[in-house]
Amino acid sequence: MRLLKTTKWLAAACIALAGIVTASAQDKGLENPRSTTFRKTLEGKKVVFLPLSMGFDLTEGWAAVMRQQAKRLKYDFEIRDPAWSTDAGTRALQSLISEKPDLIVAHNPDIQSYARLLAQAQAAGIKVVQINLESNTQTDSYVGADWTEIGEQAAQAVVDKCSPGKGASTKVAIDTGVPTAASDVFQLDGIYRVLNQHPDIQVVSQQATEYNPEKARSIMETVLQQHPDLCGAIGIWDNQDTGTASAIQQAGKGDQVFLVTSGGGNKVGCENVEKGLFNLYISYNVPLQGEILNAEIARLLLSDGTAGENKTLYFNPLTQITKANVNQRNCWTLDDLK
Amino acid sequence: MATSDALSRLRYRLLPDRLFGELLTKSWIDNVIPALALVVTILVMTWIVPGYLTVANLTDLARQVSEFGLIALALTIVILSGGIDLSVGSVFALCVLAALVSMNVLGLPVGVALAATLATGLACGLLNGVLIGYLRLRAFITTLVTLVIYRALYDIIFPRLASAIVGSMPVSPTWDLIGFGTVYGLPVSFAIFAVIAIGVHVVLSRLRPGWRLRAVGGARRSAYNAGINVKLTVCLAYVASGLLTAIAAFLFSARLGSTGADTGIGLEISVLTAVVLGGVSLGGGRGSVGNAVIGSILVLILTSGLIRLSMPGSVNQLILGLVLIAAVLFDAKWVKNRGKLLSKVYVSPTYLKLPNLMPPTGTDVLAVNDRLGAAELIGLGAVEGPEDVVLDRDDNLYTGTRHGTIVRFLAPDYARNEVFARIGGHPLGLAFAPNGDLLTCVGGMGVYRVSPDRKVTKVTDETNRSLLSVIDDSRLRLPDDLDIAPDGRIFFSEATIRYEMSEWAVDALEGRGNGRLICHDPRTGATRTILRGLIFPNGVTICRDGQSLLFAETWACRISRYWFDGPDKGKHEVFLDNLPGYPDNLNRGSDGTYWIALLGMRTKTFDLAMRKPGFRRRMAKRIAADEWLFPNINRGCVLRVSATGEIIDALWDEAGENHPSITSTCEHKGWLYLGGVSNNRIGRVRIEGADPQWTAHDDYWGKR
């Protein structure tokens, strides 16, 4: 009985197969239903990027990578540019909450200002990815550097150069950016975690430059006048630290002061390493972050989960760039990304 | 000819072209253009941005307006005072810091945090105020410097506390309510803003501090001369600015719970743009809360709309800058030209046809004589502008002067005079009440009473507002003459509601019924307008029936009678028409007659001009005021008419040396006293055959 049934099925299958083979002479493959769904789900979705400001390497880099994917997968990608104004940014965010896009990529000016608004956005059903600068609110996803790690690496590098007997002195200066931003708050924590273990290292100056190279330059100028034997300096961002570096070069102390900075790894930063302006450049790799961001955007847009239901984060790997490893792989230009 | 006259009459009756000029005089006209700009912007945004006019979006806008608008109010107050406050952005940052340190770091209660924030704003504002108000430094430079100083303070304090501020979040429902809560669907912060804005509006537009502030901003020296404490007013403007900025900072702190290095940077420019765009004049003295609010909404819509349209940030700032320049340019042009435009269009002549005038013949009662030529002069050079003259029971003579006083000449020879009372405005018509109180119409002020012990009290300075009048006609502009009815009611004329005391003669160019007759009833304290549309109503005299009054309509050259009581109550008819001149005050005379003072004589030219409103309009627009064709108000006479309205006598000053233009008469014990609004003397002539015991007092109130 069972055998008979199986035979019947086999026969039917053979006939069907024969039919298919005769109907189409060539093999055209199978439709992948997942691909169709993937594209269909993403098409027409709306993603808005709220950067600190456009017009500098990090945000332009991320935007270029995100725009490419948006174009490829046919979803909407818009940028709201508050031009360095936290207030304009909060207003843009507030109006986004009523506008209800599917996903917001937020770049926090500090860890508090957007915090409650991001929570509100999620409550309103908008998924939120934070990029590189976190806020106090953990959202659906965070992609970016672990600032504590950067701080630890930077401090460790300085400790290696400036421990007693190794450098001109044990004096170290720290140039921060905006004191309430994640890059400051968490990085300082990382720096002091290391420095506290090395009590012989003295921090002789710790000042905020507000991401402004001119201010960074004048701060370092003063520091070098007060402490001509400065051994190391930790800057918080390569763009501002071009100022720090130029103050060091002008004072003729390029060989004495070991300058560590961090940034997105763009060509200009790399060139500064080559020129010896930065001794160590910790890169958080913008193209890589852009790709991870894209993956997170796609994942979240595809997911049926509601906003804020599952919170994940990914601290992307860091690259320590020195004169030894300035190369194509570690450094990028905006044109590469477009 | 007749049909074109009729057409002309119809055209000027039907087309109310005076309204244009009247609209331009309103203070809210400054708001109209910004308001229109706002409407256009909203329409454009609705068109460009889909779903712009949604509740969510409007709520959002309301929340933004509350913080931004408060700072705009702060700046408006300072600009009204004639200054500028560039330090608002830095004050804002310091106040935000104070609020956040109180809440996040020190964990103080919300009330204490608010007090600390306000104290910070107060201190910053006070420093500005003392420097600018008392030490008289330039506002622009001073606040530019304090902008830097306050910012430096912020930069010193903030990094030390930054981690502590962002590291903790206060647990306070009130704090969260202020930041995020709603009442009846409105954000709490907006409700707070609305209450404050209404409060500031009331203070600025209705209360003394606001008026003083405008006065100081509009004309500092005049304000000082008027007795305003200019230094204090300026100082307080900056203090108010600091306090309002502090409130805005408090709302901002509650909303964001954080601050950045950029907090308040560039705020002064965007707020300045808002304020100027809203129509607050940078020159000082002009502007309102409405201006500030309209401007704030405009700027917020522009900036957030541009971000929403994904414009690059630098382009936004460029556009905002261009808008500021355009607004400043418009403000400058508007302030400069509004007055010019107004002076060009305000005079709005209309058609007025006077009956044909027959020239007097040799034997006519109106023939020129020289009976006033021999007038005795009283107080030559001691009085200026004695519009009306009146005598009391003790034969003392009273008159008002341009200096704002009532001068008394003492009987019997009137050689000595004294200031009887100081009023403040030019007293015009005078009349004695039976109890000896002197009542007077004061130009630009109202009706006042001076008791025999010289106490000055206001009787009334307003009447009921008519519904459809653009000009606020509740205020008395030019009360002219008054008389008292047997029951104590005061009837007075207001010559025109369109011109001030100083330009009364310009009203002649219009020939429209701009004046009215008003009644004040002391029993109820109410003042009501009883007749409108009168052509420069001037003298008023109660008839001997106690039920009607006579009043002169100067430019219409007629005397009318109005019954305010009795069977004919409400009746209004012409008593004497086609006078040869322009009648001013009317007074009772002996033998049941009335005296009419003519301040000028009619001329054929001007009568013709009155039938050609287009001509007068062109004249007013094109040539300077001192070259306009005015009625002849240089030379008049005194007429005596019977109770039935026949002219029975005329007194002239043939040489024109003593009393060519007469604005009032007063018969007293056989003498006729003469006043003239442009004279520097009072005259008196003996009236032949008059009862030497007759006084107006006895005629009105009986012998004592």
Image: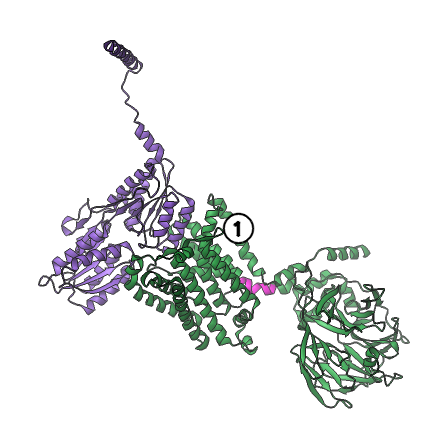
Chain colours: A purple, B green
- The spot of residue A158 in percent (x, y) is 15, 58
**Left or right of B622, for residue B202:** left
Foreground pick, B613 / A314: A314
What amino acid type is highlighted by mark number 1?
A: Val
On the image, the x and y values in percent for residue B447 come to: 70, 74
Q: Chain of mark 1?
A: B
- Closest to the observer: B500 or B391? B391
Q: Position of residue B97 (x, y in %)?
A: 35, 63
Q: Does residue B301 appear anywhere in the picture? A: no
Question: Where does label 1 land, which residue?
Answer: B40
Check the image and name the residue furthest to the right. Answer: B363
Magenta region includes residue B518: no
Crowding at mark 1 (Cα within 10 Å: few <14, some 14-19, many 20+): few
Please determine whether, in this image, residue B658 is positioned above or below residue B198.
Answer: below
Question: Residue shown at 28%/15% (left/top)?
Answer: A25
Residue A225, relative to residue A263: is it above or below? Answer: below
Q: Main secondary structure of the magenta part?
A: helix
Instruction: Tell me the quarter of the picture where residue B636 sits.
Output: bottom right
Q: Quadrant of the N terminus of chain A?
A: top left
Residue sitting at 73 percent across and 55 percent down?
Answer: B14
Q: Is residue B129 left or right of residue A296?
A: right
Left or right: B648 as drawn, with respect to A154: right
For residue B530, side relative to residue A124 (left or right): right
Q: Which stretch appears magenta?
A: B333-340
Element type at mark 1: helix
